[in-house]
Amino acid sequence: MRILYLFANHSSMMYQWQKYHIFDEMAQHNCIFDIISPSNFENIEQLNDAIIKRIRSNHYDIFLTSYNENVIDISTIELIKKCGVATVLFCPDNLVDPFRHKRIASKFDLVWLTSKETEYLFKRWGANTIFLPYAANPNFLKGDIPRNDIPRVGFIGTPHGSRVANINTLIERGIPLTVHSKKADTNNAVFRASGQEYIKVIKDYIKYPIGRKLLCGAVLDKLGNNEVDLDNPNLVLKDPVPLRELANANSSFALTLSFTAANSTGVLKHPVDIVNLRNFEIPMSGGLQFCRYSDEIASYFEPDKEIVLFHNDDEMIEKARFYLADENRKLRMNMKIAARKRAERDHTWYNRFSVIFDKLNLPHE
């Protein structure tokens, strides 16, 4: 299986995670990704010409991209299809930015959505959709589940939006918590954009119910306290975790904090739920994931056996104290092992791509 992937390929983690997760795992199943990046071309015309040349001079089974018509011409997609190559649009941000692909979605053979909630919009635009959530690479995330884990809640990432409120609630109520993040980013993780970009985001958000909740959450978050209490004695701030050490870091804590509220909607009474990469990285690492309940995350991992879920702040504190207790060390170990087994069985990238291949009637391993 060979896939031509139109992919930004920048050095930031926003892009590099796909190398460690998708490309590495799929290579183990004889599926090779060839990358073509817009940054390697002077203009869009050169890029589109290069795509067509690559398609015509090589055998590819799939053309994959997350770009819209501002980068990949609709005529290029049609030519790719005429060459007998299946086309797939990957939309990992379809919950918070569905309108980016409004014009182009229907041109692809298949549109891969990672959130169900906006699928109705893509259907309305004539797209052939499939819902498949994120996953994790079991080869990359081989965590060493320690018998003597750190009796603290750990969080690896940047505190922003409604994450700050959860972190402050935990430490203010006596829960020991370690955050791995750049200190400069801890209370400065803000969205920076031009006035035109802000206007476009607002216009898109008001077009659909979830967008309006995202907008409301952003406004309330800005009006509230959105800074981590760095002086609280229960908080330990450490350096970011290098990618190669992510698995061991996730599994080393008694509980590893994650979040299921999209953007800043955790400040709302009814947040917009979202499941992202971290929700699969933690269990695949052998970590015991600790996050707010959502129906979707509870369908992937069994509560109180493979994951620890809470419905409100009081339950969050109660469960944190219970699972951090030394007498529950063995229970934590068993849950971590169970979470890793579930992730290996159900939530690999090969599992996800196998569904894509079947949908497109492509033979695979």
Image (cartoon, rainbow, N blue to C red):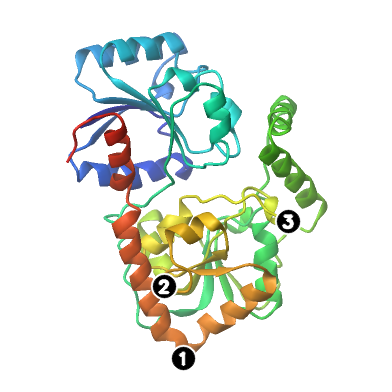
Q: Secondary structure at mark 2?
A: helix
Q: Which-is-in-front pick, marks 3 and 2? A: 3
Please provide percent x and percent y for residue 331: 41, 82
Give how far apart the Cα atoms at labels 1 and 3 are.
34 Å
Q: Is residue 232 above or below residue 53?
A: below
Residue beneath the point at 54% across and 57% down: 295
Q: Which numbered disc, 1 or 3, marks the residue that appears first in the sequence?
A: 3
- Count neighbours of disc 2 (C-alpha within 10 A) and say few if under 14, some if 14 to 19, many if 20 or more: many
Q: Are marks 2 and 1 in contact (CB under 8 Å)?
A: no
| Residue at image coords 62%, 49% | 262
Query: In the drawing, does residue 157 fall left or right of residue 226?
Result: left
User: In 3D space, how far apart are the residues under numbered discs 2 and 1 (Cα atoms)?
Assistant: 17 Å
Residue beneath label 1, please? Answer: 327
Q: CA distance from mark 3 to mark 2?
A: 29 Å
- Quadrant of residue 97 within the rendered picture: top right
- Is residue 133 visible in the rendered image? The answer is yes
* Callout 3 amino acid: Val
Residue at image mark 2: 252
Q: Is residue 240 visible?
A: no
The percent coordinates of residue 214 (x first, y second) are 69, 43
Q: How many marks?
A: 3
Task: Please state, as top left, top right, bottom left or bottom right, where the N terminus lies in the image.
Answer: top left
Given residues 217 and 273, the one toward you in this image is 273
**Which residue type carries mark 2?**
Ser
Where disc 3 sits, the SS reads: helix
Vertical position of residue 244 compared to residue 17: above or below:
below
69 or 273, nearer to the observer: 273
Image quadrant of residue 267? bottom right
First in sequence: mark 2 vs mark 1: 2
- Which numbered disc, 2 or 1, marks the residue closer to the eye? 1
Residue highlighted by disc 3 = 267
Within-10-Å neighbours for mark 3: few <14, some 14–19, many 20+: many
